[in-house]
Image (cartoon, grey):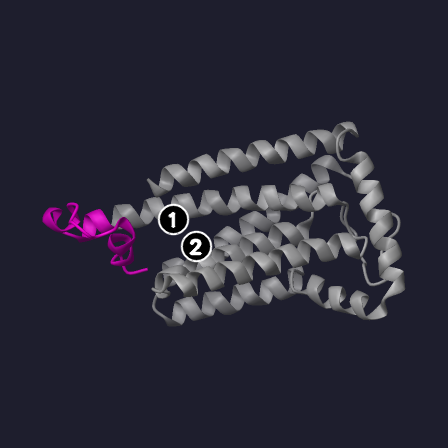
Amino acid sequence: MQCRIGVAATVLLLALFLGIAWTVQTGSGFGAVDEQSSLMLQNLRTQSALMRDIFVFITNLGSTRLLTWLAIGMAIVFFCLRKPWLSCTWLLMLILGFLSYGLIKDLYARPRPPLHDPAIVESTFSFPSGHSFESLVAYGFLAYLLLPYLRRRSSRLLLFSGVALLVLAIGFSRIYLGAHYLSDVMGGYTAGGCWLMTCIAVLERVRQTRVKRLLPPKIIEPVPGASEEHLIGMGGV
């Protein structure tokens, strides 16, 4: 059931990304909104030095350098917890994701907004937003891996709310600082979400297969009051 939901979400996000990419490539749809939002936020940025500094800090939370250190650090943690396959999965998922959005940037080759902040020094193309893609994939997948260790619903809600707010703030900071257009950020979210859901769906399938191999048939039969999540959690992840 969870795998089917993951596949459905992946297809939906892919369709949304292709729709946004089509409007970017043809210059329709988001064009006027991109220009107006970029100009409006450029005016706000010049009026408040404090807000500008805050968003520079936030945007750095989604930088490739910081997320690279996060990836290495969590890989070491997983290895120390005697979960080497999870460590490799984490690294492989992030590396392939980061490489894929770079190829997409080169494919569409969209120039960056001209009215960007001096703190923004980028040599890559604008669409899709790498910060939006990377932050959603890295922080989203990390939240997914931490999920089995949080039994209380309130703790899970707090985790996902915190990750969602962080990812949204990073995306908004890219528009605020003039590093990207709104459509770039939306493209980064949909492409990143597509890759994230694909990885989660594959990992859930692997987990279910491991559970069926490790547990006797009688144990994996449905038991009143036992959820699929509890069985998956017994798989040693």
In the drawing, does residue 81 fall left or right of residue 208? right
Magenta-drawn stretch contains 206: no
Q: As drawn, which residue projects farthest toward the front? A: 154
- Which of the image's four quarters has the C terminus? bottom left
Q: Residue at x 37, y 65 (%)?
A: 150
The residue type indicated by label 1 comes to Leu
The residue type indicated by label 2 comes to Thr
Position above or below: 194 against 159:
above
| x and y percentages locating residue 3 in the rendered image | 37, 40
In the drawing, does residue 89 fall left or right of residue 215? right
| x and y percentages locating residue 22 in the rendered image | 69, 29
Front-most of residues 2 and 198: 2
Position above or below: 218 against 50:
above
| x and y percentages locating residue 200 in the rendered image | 43, 48
Measure how far apart labels 1 and 2 are at the Cα level. Answer: 9 Å
Q: Secondary structure at mark 2?
A: helix
Please report contact status of discs 1 and 2: CB closer than 8 Å, yes or no. Answer: yes
Front-most of residues 160 and 27: 160
Q: How many other residues sit within 10 Å of disc 2, few (<14), some (14-19) or many (≥20)?
A: some
> Which quadrant of the figure has residue 162?
bottom right
- Which of the image's four quarters has the N terminus? top left
Front-most of residues 193 and 39: 39
Magenta segment range?
A: 211-237
Give the labeled residue for mark 2: 89
Magenta-drawn stretch contains 230: yes
Q: Which mark sits nearer the N-terminus, 1 or 2?
A: 2
Q: Residue at x 82, y 63 (%)?
A: 119
Q: Residue at x 34, y 68 (%)?
A: 82
Position above or below: 38 against 164:
above
Give the labeled residue for mark 1: 203
Visible residue check, residue 117: no
Q: Secondary structure at mark 1?
A: helix
